[in-house]
Amino acid sequence: MLRFLSGGESHGKCLVGIIEGLPSNLEIDINKINKELSRRQKGYGRGGRMKIEKDKVEILSGIRGGKTIGSPVSLLIKNRDWENWKEVMSIIDNIDNDKKVNSPRPGHGDLAGAVKYNQTDIRNILERASARETAMRVAIGSIAKQLLKKFDIYIYSHVLEIGNVRINARKVSIEQLQKIDESPLRVIDKETENKIIKKIDEAKKQGDTLGGIFELIAVNVPIGLGSHVNWDRKLDGIIAQAIMSIQGIKGVEIGLGFESSRTLGSQVHDEIYYNGQYYRKTNNAGGIEAGITNGNNIVVRAAMKPIPTLSRPLDSVDMITKQNTKAQKERSDVCAVPSASIVGENVLAWVLAKEFVNKFGGDSIEEMLSNYKRYIQYVDKR
């Protein structure tokens, strides 16, 4: 079974992660991990912290000579801003009262988390609830991407909409997605990009934030991942939970999604044909039917709310005095939708890699590839 754990606070010393269940002899390129970390930090609308944190991963165990050895892989990403936060985030020393946070931000986990964990200093909640946590998930997802590449599976993403400004195109080609990082907003057309940039600039002047929608596309995924037999094995459910766990995501749809509820069944369902193998002319199901991949590309969209940290804070209540006040102000972004799309890629990569390990097993990558090839031969004969 493939699984991971991560730990670390936003302004703590570092982020850590441990992956268990990777097959041995899988080649791991640390430069590819660092490239994914760099992609996560880019995007028009990001805040000042991105100029401070130039994330680099350090591999502590589980890899030797550039290949996994079958034991847990442990990762570390240092927080370069740690020197400025040593006193505030001290592990041993008592924290000064004037450095504690008492005013929860609407839209964040501050209030609910403080009540749940019986905390008077909200920083004990917001540090882990922060999207900084996704840096480690991207590093872990990058390793998952390197596993999937062995099976010729690739994951792309792009931004569909920010601040109610949406791209004009109805279809996006893989060729366009391969060049999408050239856009600071990760959108496919320049006209939309310029409109969104203006929208972000306006929100920044007003001390406000913007959300949006991004799309993920996984290509060359074989038929048969996931299962219909129980609720917790349905792949679309697993994907939805994983994508929804990304900070700020409030909606997830697969394939035609919500639009399918407004359309006749004859116009929704992907008709089946055969010319030596089964195929569809459409992909409204987004590559998944009854919780099982059907051989088409997996298509997932996620809606991200505006970031809850505003430079012009909203009304709140001091949790100590119970007096009306303004919400805590932290250093933050105006818009992080492009960054969230990179996180989404790597989260989806992890889900698919886990399903591959579940289905094709093997203690080494060679055994796993052999199992996969036999399965594909079986599928081709159906």
Image (cartoon, rainbow, N blue to C red):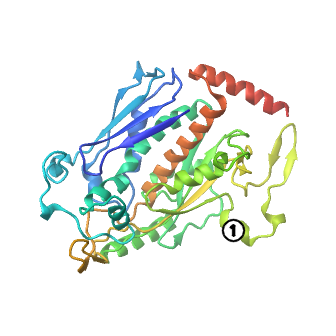
Q: Is residue 152 visible?
A: no
Q: Tell me the quadrant of the picture where the N terminus can be found.
A: top right
Q: Residue at x 79, y 52 (%)?
A: 281
**Where 26 sits versus 9, above or below?**
above
Image coords of residue 11 (percent x, y) = 25, 51
Work out whether residue 114 or residue 150 is closer to the camera in this orientation and state it.
Answer: 114
The three-letter amino acid code for the residue at tag 1 is: Glu
* Residue found at the very far bottom of the displayed protein: 324
Work out whether residue 374 or residue 194 is closer to the camera in this orientation and state it.
Answer: 374
Image coords of residue 156 (percent x, y) = 55, 48
Image coords of residue 135 (percent x, y) = 38, 46
Neighbour tally class for label 1: few under 14, some 14-19, many 20 plus, Cα within 10 Å = few
Image coords of residue 340 (percent x, y) = 45, 55
Q: Which residue is mark 1?
A: 259
Work out whether residue 190 or residue 32 is closer to the camera in this orientation and state it.
Answer: 32
Look at the numbered disc 1 and give the secondary structure of its residue: helix
Q: In the displayed structure, does residue 297 sit left or right of residue 9?
A: right
**Where 142 sits versus 280, above or below?**
above
Q: In the displayed structure, does residue 138 sit left or right of residue 319?
A: right
Q: Is residue 98 visible?
A: yes
Q: Residue at x 37, y 70 (%)?
A: 209
Q: Tell me the quadrant of the picture where the C terminus can be found.
A: top right
Q: In the displayed structure, does residue 26 sit left or right of residue 332?
A: right
**Where 313 sits versus 290, above or below?**
below
Q: Residue at x 41, y 47 (%)?
A: 39
